[in-house]
């Protein structure tokens, strides 16, 4: 009964509101930046926060199908918005590294890539999501047909790369880091189980 009420209420919420809500973390980061609330290394903190917000949205997108399967909560109509918001924050995360951290010095960026192998994983995840973002429109869905779903399976390795990238940049993996790894592992296990034992309608 409660889930039906929630789903009924959600049907009246336009996906446009999700895009607006997705700007709230960015507004908070900007506020912290202008109010000197980012600590002694604001550039690294901006990078870190933008990447973590992207990961939150990516994991949230992966959780939509299990939420419907196990709890009846229907958020499918918001999945595209959540995915595009995640990609938006990834673009900002990469831009912060290139512009603020590397100051557009490409030779320095290459040296940083050699020195920090986890950056390759982050870039791999970002590149994997580019075709997904580019085809997140109705015209692409119609044109690609069944191939659209196959293409969008790239989200799983992309998020996996992102989680490993996040863990590897830590000198010592924190409790939060292990929580991210556990959450991704659980979501993947649910996906594999769902494919092996599909729900009969």
Image: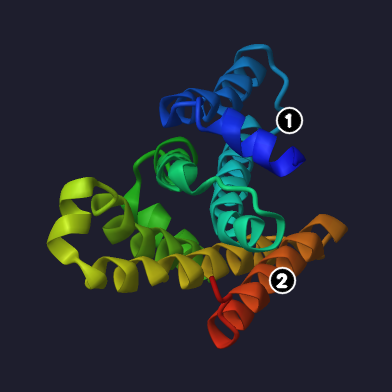
Q: Quadrant of residue 102?
A: top left
Closest to the observer: 76 or 105?
76
Identify which residue is drawn at 20% across, 66% down. 145
Q: Secondary structure at mark 2?
A: helix
Q: Is residue 125 above or below residue 4?
A: below
Where, by quadrant of the figure, is residue 149 drawn?
Answer: bottom left
In the displayed structure image, the side of residue 163 where residue 101 appears, left or right: left
Left or right side of 162 for 81:
left
Q: How many numbered circles does the render carry?
A: 2
Q: Residue 67 or 95: which is nearer the viewer?
A: 67
Q: Residue furthest right?
A: 175
Q: Residue furthest bottom?
A: 196
Residue 102 vs residue 32: left or right?
Answer: left
Find residue 188 and report its horizontal and vertical position in percent.
62, 74
The answer to whether residue 139 is left or right of residue 96 is left
Horizontal and vertical percent for residue 55?
59, 51
* Residue at 66%, 78% in the rendered image: 189
**Mark 1 or 2, closer to the camera:** 2
Q: Which mark is residue 186?
A: 2
Label 1 vs 2, first from the N-terminus? 1
Q: Which mark is residue 193?
A: none
Circle 1 residue: 40
Q: Can the viewer see residue 156? A: yes
Q: Residues within 10 Å of mark 1 (few under 14, many from 20)?
A: few
Residue closer to the observer: 136 or 127 = 136
Q: Identify the element where label 1 is drawn.
A: loop
Picture coordinates of residue 8, whole percent (x, y): 58, 33
């Amino acid at each position: 009964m409660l889930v039906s009420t929630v789903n009924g209420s959600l049907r009246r919420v336009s996906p446009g509101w999700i895009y607006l809500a997705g700007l709230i973390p960015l507004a908070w980061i900007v506020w912290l930046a202008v109010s000197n609330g980012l600590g002694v290394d604001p550039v690294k903190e901006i990078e870190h926060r933008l990447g973590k917000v992207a990961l939150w949205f990516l994991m949230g997108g992966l959780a939509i199908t299990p939420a419907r399967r196990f709890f009846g909560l229907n958020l499918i109509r918001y999945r595209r918005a959540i995915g595009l918001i995640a990609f938006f924050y990834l673009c900002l995360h990469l831009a912060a590294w290139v512009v603020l951290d590397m100051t557009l010095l490409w030779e320095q960026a290459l040296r940083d890539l050699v020195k920090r192998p986890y950056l390759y994983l982050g870039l791999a995840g970002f590149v994997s999501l580019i075709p997904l973002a580019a085809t997140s429109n109705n015209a692409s869905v119609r044109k690609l047909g069944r191939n659209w779903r196959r293409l969008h399976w790239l989200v799983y390795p992309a998020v996996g790369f992102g989680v490993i990238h996040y863990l590897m940049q830590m000198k010592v993996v924190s409790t939060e880091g292990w929580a991210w790894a556990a959450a991704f592992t659980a979501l993947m296990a649910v996906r594999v189980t769902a494919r092996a034992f599909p729900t009969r309608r």
